[in-house]
Image (cartoon, rainbow, N blue to C red):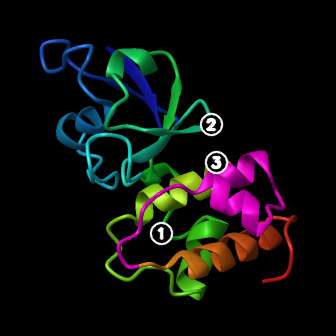
Amino acid sequence: MDLTINGRQATVDDAAVQPDMPLLWVLRDVLNLTGTKFGCGIAACGACTVHVDGQAVRSCVMPVAAVAGKQIRTIEGLGAADAPHALQQAWAAHNVPQCGYCQSGMLMAAAALLQKNSAPSDADIDAAITNLCRCGTYPRVRAAIHSAAQSLGGGKKA
C-alpha cells in the first residue's frame, strides 16, 4: 500500500498491514513515526489526531485503507526543529504543555482549525478543539492559538 505522509511517499508491505488496521498503528509501529500518540482507542481523547487531506482525524479509528491516495500529515510534518510552526512557537511561549502527552494531537487539531479559520474566537476554539488534556491547560491552549493566529496574519492580540 502506498501512502503520502508529510509530503513523502511511503510504501507499507501489504503483508505487514491489514486494510482495517488503524492508521495510528501503521504510523507508529510500521513507519516509526511515534509523535502521534495512543490515548483511548475510541476516538474520544484526540491524542492520535493527524490530518488527512487537511482535515483533523482521529487515527486510532481510521482504517489505513481509507487513507490510501490521500495526503496525511503528522506532528512530524507540522514544523521542523529549525523552523517550528507558529503553533509550536506559541505553545512554547505560553507554556502550554505540562506532561505533554496529548500535545501532538492538540497541535494537529489547532493547525486544522487555523487552516479553516484564521481568526477563531474562544467559542470557535472550544468547538474545534475537543481533545482531552488531563493537565487542564485549556486556557493556555486558547491563548496560544490566538497568538499563532495573529503571527500567521489573523486572529486577535493574545
Q: Which of 94 and 29 is in front in this view?
A: 94
Label ID, residue 81: 1
- Three-letter amino acid code at the position of disc 1: Ala
In this figure, what is the number of numbered marks?
Answer: 3
Residue 100 x %, y %? 35, 73
Q: Residue at x 80, y 51 (%)?
A: 117
Identify the residue position indicated by label 2 in the image.
54
Q: Give the range drawn in magenta.
A: 113-135
Is residue 116 within the magenta segment?
Answer: yes
Q: How far apart are marks 3 and 1 (CA)?
A: 20 Å
Q: Nearer the viewer, residue 93 or 22?
A: 22
Q: Give left or right: position of 51 versus 150.
A: left
Q: How far apart are marks 1 and 2 (CA)?
A: 22 Å
Q: Residue at x 34, y 22 (%)?
A: 64
Label ID, residue 112: 3
Q: Distance between the residues labelled 2 and 3?
A: 7 Å
Residues at marks 2 and 3 touching, judged by CB atoms closer than 8 Å: yes
Task: Choose the circle earlier in sequence order: 3 or 1.
Answer: 1
Residues at marks 1 and 2 touching, judged by CB atoms closer than 8 Å: no
Q: Which residue is drawn at 79% across and 72% down?
A: 151
Q: Which residue is drawn at 67% across and 79% down?
A: 143
Task: Choose the circle earlier in sequence order: 2 or 3.
Answer: 2
Task: Choose the circle earlier in sequence order: 1 or 2.
Answer: 2
Is residue 119 within the magenta segment?
Answer: yes
